[in-house]
């Protein structure tokens, strides 16, 4: 996109703003824009979020989990108003093998999302609206809190399994919901306003998306332990603690990059792999379920490390 420079007066040069961008971010006369010089580039940005508008979706035929993922995806995309229509009042929950009302699932998912509320509901539709503005200035503090809570959840999983504490493990569901709320807010913010360094937006979105997958692994591992009630051996606990250490090191790398931290994460991943290979044939089937679920975490962290390296250069 090219724009002609217009000279105004003796020393003022003016460039027009693209109309599409002005409309998308609701730029008005008198608004202040941020300008940043980067060599030959002049970056113009605003703290306003993009106006994503309204969307209507027919959710007939979805199951409970698919409906929750759909609502979350639309929220992350940045829509301000969502109308969900449906032909049936009930929806199936495959994991529990039971039916729930559609509206109860909608309300359940909204508890995991910041700033959305039900404004109107009838027997065959529901209207959801955003009741709070996304502020890019909140992004960093919310992401840091999500990192911190994720470390706490990982530690609680280890302690719960090591002490066979079902009560502690049962709290992982609530922790999962809280962290999901924070990560979803971050992804919505990136979709609507981008990252403060726009060149890193795609990379940081990818990292947050992967953190959400790590979160699900921790939740599902806790569920598996409660269901199968395995006797967890000392070598398995050792591996779990190494995985937790890798997660902690990644958090440190994300906020304070260094080559030594990259090498440490790589070393921890390989150490975990060797430890798993050493004891794999000695583990019970129930323990193997736990190990197989958790081993995906260091693999995801390696991929996330590559993305973090991309942000650095």
Image (tube, rainbow, N blue to C red):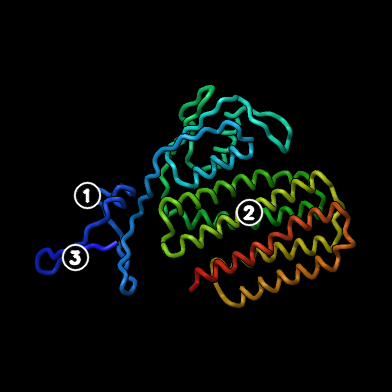
Judge depth for marks 1 and 3 and give the one in front: 3
Q: Secondary structure at mark 2?
A: helix
Which residue does the numbered mark 1 point to in the structure image?
Answer: 29
In the rendering, at what x and y percent does residue 165 appear? 79, 48
Nearer to the camera, 167 or 200: 200
Left or right of residue 256, residue 222 in this image: right
Residue ranking furthest to the left: 9
Q: Badge 1: few (under 14), some or many (20 or more) residues near its Cα, within 10 Å?
A: few
Query: Which callout, 3 or 2, points to the residue nearer the camera?
Result: 3
Residue 125 is tagged as: none
In the figure, is residue 266 to the left or right of 239? left
The kind of secondary structure element at disc 3 is loop
Determine which residue is flagged by label 3.
5
Q: Position of residue 169 (x, y in %)?
A: 74, 47
* Residue at 40 percent of width and 44 percent of height: 52
Query: Quick one: quadrant of the N terminus?
Result: bottom left
Question: N-terminal of the two: label 1 or label 3?
Answer: 3
- Point 85% across, 62% down: residue: 234
Q: Secondary structure at mark 1?
A: loop
Q: Residues within 10 Å of mark 2 (few under 14, many from 20)?
A: some
Q: Earlier in the sequence, mark 2 or mark 1?
A: 1
Give the mark, 3 or 2, whose residue is nearer the N terminus. 3
Q: Is residue 104 above or below residue 40?
A: above
Instruction: Give the crowd class for mark 3: few <14, some 14-19, many >=20 residues within 10 Å.
Output: few
* Residue positioned 80% across, 65% down in the render: 276
Q: Which mark is residue 213?
A: 2
From mark 1 to mark 3, how far is it between C-alphas? 20 Å
Specify whether 195 is left or right of 303. left
């Amino acid at each position: 996109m090219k724009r002609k420079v217009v000279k105004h007066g003796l020393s003022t040069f003016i460039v027009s703003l693209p109309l599409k961008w002005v409309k998308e971010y609701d730029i008005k006369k008198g608004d202040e824009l941020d300008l940043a010089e980067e060599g030959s580039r002049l970056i113009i940005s605003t703290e306003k979020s993009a106006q994503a508008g309204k969307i209507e979706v027919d959710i007939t035929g979805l199951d409970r989990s698919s409906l929750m993922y759909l609502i979350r995806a639309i929220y992350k995309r940045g829509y301000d108003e969502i109308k969900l229509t449906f032909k049936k009042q009930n929806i199936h929950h495959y994991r529990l093998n039971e039916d729930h009302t559609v509206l109860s699932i909608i309300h359940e998912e909204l508890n995991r999302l910041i700033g959305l509320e039900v404004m109107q509901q009838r027997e065959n539709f529901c209207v959801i609206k955003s009741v709070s503005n996304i502020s890019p200035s909140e992004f960093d503090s919310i992401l840091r809190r999500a990192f911190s809570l994720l470390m706490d959840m990982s530690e609680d999983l280890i302690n719960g399994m090591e002490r066979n504490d079902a009560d502690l493990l049962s709290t992982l569901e609530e922790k999962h919901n809280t962290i999901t709320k924070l990560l979803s807010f971050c992804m919505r913010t990136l979709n609507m306003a981008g990252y403060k360094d726009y060149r890193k937006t795609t990379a940081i979105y990818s990292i947050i998306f992967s953190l959400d997958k790590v979160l699900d692994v921790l939740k599902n591992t806790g569920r598996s332990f409660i269901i199968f009630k395995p006797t967890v051996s000392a070598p398995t606990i050792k591996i779990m603690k190494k995985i937790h250490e890798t997660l902690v090191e990644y958090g440190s790398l994300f906020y304070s990059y260094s080559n030594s931290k990259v090498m440490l994460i790589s070393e921890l991943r390989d150490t975990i792999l060797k430890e798993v290979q050493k004891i794999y044939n000695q583990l019970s089937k129930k323990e193997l379920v736990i190990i197989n679920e958790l081993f995906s975490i260091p693999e995801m962290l390696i991929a996330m490390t590559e993305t973090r390296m991309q942000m650095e250069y």
